[in-house]
Each structure stands twice: as C-alpha cells, then as structure tokens.
C-alpha cells in the first residue's frame, strides 16, 4: 500500500461511494463471472458513474409537445461531448456511455502496457477534428500505475482538448497519486480504490486483466 495515501489531498479526485455501484463492482471481481456478464456489469457500472460525472452538462431549451400541451424544456448539448475509451478495455465503458447518451461522438486511443517496463505504448489515435471545442470524457476501467491515463491525457491535449474528465472503475492508490499530481486540473471519478499494486503492477485485489475478461481472452 502507498504510505500516507490520503484521497483528500487530491481535490480533483472523487470517490463514488454508492452501495449499488460497489455491489456491481464486487460481482465484477468474481473469478467465476463469465465474459458476457462481466461485459454487462462494466456497462452498468459505467452508466452509474457517467450519471455522476456528467452532472454539470450544459443544456439548451427546446419546444416539446406533450399529450397535454406544448412546453419549453431542457435538452443536453450532445454535440459538445466526446467520449474517448482507451483501447481495448475502455470499449466496455463506451457501451455504457452510448446507452446513457445515444448518438454521442466517440474518439479512440490505443495504448498497451509493456510487460517488462510496465510503461504504456501508443499504437492508435483517432479523435474528432473539433476536439478542442468538446468536453472530453476519457474512459478506462483500471487506474493502476497511472501511466496509460497520463499518456492519454497528453495525447488529448496535443490534439487541442481543453476540457477533460477521466472516469475509471477501480484504482490503486499509486495510480491516483500519479494521475492527480500530473493532472491536478482534470476531474477524476473513481468507483473504488483498492489496496495496492503488486510486483507486476496489477491492482490488488483488483479483478485481473479487464480487457481479457471483457473479450473472453483469459489464458
């Protein structure tokens, strides 16, 4: 465990302590949870986290005709949003955001972890050309060392993104510390914070390799 870790030191980090969210994450951890259910749980958890992370969305008024009368009501500015999953595990969270706000724009960043150095390596990036005008929500289920998330933020900023929020499901104290110190200006939403990283930089107790479990490629 990271010594002297205190989440309150990191003003941009928010731990979402909701019983239903924790319940679903517990089911996600279970080694007996099969890929189809695992993927569904990631989707459901992402919807719950997205509900909190998107609380301050801008709205505009439109005229709507109900069965009773015409009325002016607010609608979300979906054109101002962009969800960016970090491939490949982040795709599971993208499914949840698609259900929460159908028709939203997505970008994709591909990073993989070098098994020897534990450092992230970029292999793909596709973002909308107007990324600088959008509120960007970076998605990755696991925040372990923080390296992939930090690199993804650098990529987004290099492409002009100015408003970025990061959403993860499980984080290690080491990853929270690294991310918040590198990006104190970026809101970080976390489902749960686990005990520590092991010698292979896996989160403990964690849930294993999230991408493998989503896509059924566990060895």
Image: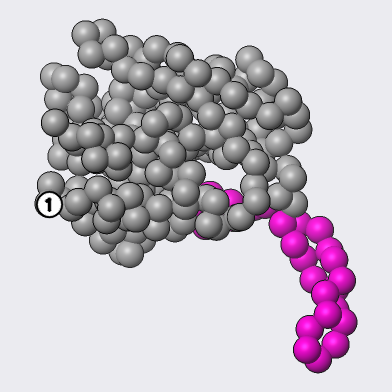
Identify the residue shown where x is 30% and y is 35%. 211
Image x and y of residue 218, in percent: 18, 35
Left or right of 105 on screen, residue 53: left
Looking at the image, residue 157 lies above or below residue 30: above
Q: How is the image coloured?
A: one colour
Quarter holding the N terminus is top left
Image x and y of residue 158, in percent: 63, 15
Range of residues picked out in magenta: 49-76
The residue pinned by badge 1 equals 32
Q: Is residue 77 visible?
A: yes
Identify the residue shown where x is 31% and y is 17%. 113
Based on the picture, tell me whether residue 63 belongs to the magenta stretch: yes
Based on the picture, tell me whether residue 200 belongs to the magenta stretch: no
**Mark 1 nearby-residue class (10 Å; few <14, some 14–19, many ≥20):** few
Image x and y of residue 28, in percent: 24, 51
Q: Residue lying at the far top in this picture: please name it.
A: 117
């Amino acid at each position: 465990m990271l010594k002297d870790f205190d989440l309150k030191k990191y003003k941009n980090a928010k731990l979402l302590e909701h019983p239903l969210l924790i319940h679903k994450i517990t089911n996600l951890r279970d080694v007996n949870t099969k890929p189809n259910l695992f993927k569904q749980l990631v989707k459901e958890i992402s919807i719950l986290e997205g509900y909190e992370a998107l609380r301050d969305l801008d709205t505009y008024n439109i005229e709507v005709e109900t069965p009773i009368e015409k009325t002016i009501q607010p609608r979300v500015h979906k054109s101002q949003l962009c969800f960016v999953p970090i491939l490949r595990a982040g795709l599971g969270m993208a499914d949840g955001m698609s259900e929460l706000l159908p028709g939203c724009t997505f970008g994709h960043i591909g990073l993989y972890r070098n098994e020897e150095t534990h450092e992230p390596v970029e292999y793909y990036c596709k973002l909308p050309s107007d990324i600088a005008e959008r509120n960007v929500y970076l998605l990755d289920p696991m925040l372990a060392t923080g390296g992939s998330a930090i690199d993804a933020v650098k990529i987004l900023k290099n492409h002009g993104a100015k408003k970025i929020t990061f959403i993860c499901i499980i984080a290690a104290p080491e990853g929270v510390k690294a991310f918040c110190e590198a990006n104190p200006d970026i809101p970080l939403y976390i489902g749960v914070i686990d005990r520590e990283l092991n010698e292979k930089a896996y989160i403990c107790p964690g849930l294993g390799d999230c991408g493998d479990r989503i896509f059924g490629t566990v060895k």
